[in-house]
Image (cartoon, helix red, strand yellow):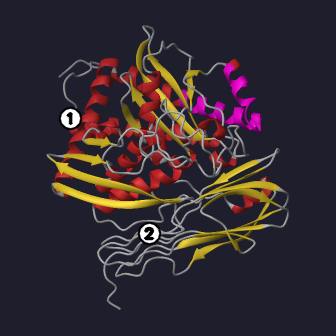
Amino acid sequence: MRPRGAVRRGALDPIELQVLTGALRACVEEMGAALIRAAHSANIKERRDCSTALFDGAGEMVMQAEHIPVHLGSMPDAVAAVLGERHARGRAWILNDPFAGGTHLPDITVITPIFAGERGELLGFAASRAHHADVGGRIPGSMPADSTRLEEEGVVISPRPLTERALRELVARMRQPEERRADLRAQLAANRIGARRLEQLGARLGVERLHEGTAAVLDYAERRTRASLVALGGGERRAEDVLEAPEGDLVLRLRATVRDGRLLLDFAGSAAQHEGNLNCPLSVTRAACAFALRVLTDPDIPPSAGAHRPLEVRAPQGSLLNARAGAAVVAGNVETSSRVADLVLSAFGRAQGQGTMNNLTLGDRDFTYYETIGGGQGACEHADGPSAVHVAMSNTLNTPIEALEREFPLRVRRYEVRRGSGGSAAHRGGDGVVRELEALSPMTYSLITERRRHSPRGAQGGGPGRPGRNLLDEAELPAKSTGELRAGDVLRIETPGGGGFGRDRA
């Protein structure tokens, strides 16, 4: 027997591994719950457009909460952007620059270093990312459908310490600064909870044992992912799809190669960098690929950097999927990322979901409101696709009608399932939704949507879902549009249905 209180060294046994994995999961989920409960904006407290994660001292993600895929898959690049800085207790970092670890400007990341005991050894980092309802820029909500330069989309925050002075300076450049300040403080509070929980784990296990344990979790996730890739079968698969730019379609191409438990996703031949805002920084492209990898493998694999180790993503620099610094990216984060996920899943024979977040932004000098709208999910081999859900890179909730109408000058005229919009098949695609909003005062709107010209595809002979529609007082709007609403104007969004799976034998 070992003495009471002694820490056993060596590899973790399977039970210890599962206990530690559960403890880390609990930490990040508690961080997310705190952020949602402390936030002031509807976008975070109602829609839950936020994410949390823990990283080790080397910047590897040891655990993420099951929040927003496009946030989490790219958050390692945010931590990497501050990894080499001088860290101290109580010094947090803030950034949103898409070319320095961010995604698009409304997604602001706060990173807090975590230290152990009196010696102050760096244990790791707590990180949170949230979509803020406004970060400045040309239009309320910071989601212009027609931007051509990054600075049109809001305040660009290169990695910097989040001091009180920095906080005052940044929110002063945004609309509704007090709400922005409150949401950023909620992120800081969430990070403090994550830091406290990891410190407690370090105190209970010992710092060395905690390092051994988190390394074991990452290695376990890697082994499980490699085994799942082997089960998919080796070889090369190809897929092609398009994005609906205002001037015409932009082609995306993929060559997916599975070999020896590894997955290479090569996007050579895809469209060049866009003059508009459909561009992706490479971190967003990687995030979409990491999401698709998770869908293709075992969902019980710990969501961590270990699961991403067998994945390699290649996209030519200067292309739509690896844009150069300064490019407009606000639609790339939400719409192009969705198409990348579609492309990967299509290569492996999956039916497509709605393939868009149906982004709607509304606002004036006094308020800003942003929402994504659910639609149909693709069917699978054994089941119909779910209807009226957020799919792929979104994973947010809708804003409850009661909360929306109480807080904003809007009235919800209609919110219902778009019956029959899913693809017909042996297993039908999920149906989209119909959402009608009436403006009760003058305001600016911005719509960034996809799958209006092209339908989500089915698989194995399944039919396509119906494409979506955007209407203003019954007049058709383009997939990407920005304009003004008068009191009494009604916006109607009909979201796409998902593709079906298998030939319909009826």
Q: Which mark is residue 32?
A: none
Q: Position of residue 483 (x, y in %)?
A: 74, 57
Where does the magenta region start and end? Answer: 166-192
Which residue is found at the position 59% from the left and 62% from the top?
Answer: 479
Magenta segment includes 172 = yes
Query: Mark 1 = which residue?
Result: 13
Looking at the image, residue 449 lies above or below residue 171: below
Dominant secondary structure of the residues highlighted in magenta in the image: helix
Q: Quadrant of the N terminus?
A: top left
State which mark lies toward you, 1 or 2. 2
Residue at 28% of width from left, 41% of height from top?
312
- Nearest to N terminus: mark 1 or mark 2: 1
Q: Is residue 52 above or below residue 257?
A: above
Q: Give the image quarter of residue 20.
A: top left
Label 1 Cα neighbours within 10 Å, binned few <14 / some 14-19 / many ≥20: few
Residue 345 placement: quadrant: bottom left
Q: Where in the figure is residue 35, as x and y percent of width and height?
A: 59, 39
Q: What x and y, as percent, mark residue 136?
A: 70, 37
Residue pointed to by mark 2: 456
Instruction: Name the element at disc 2.
Output: loop
Q: Does 182 lie within the magenta span?
A: yes
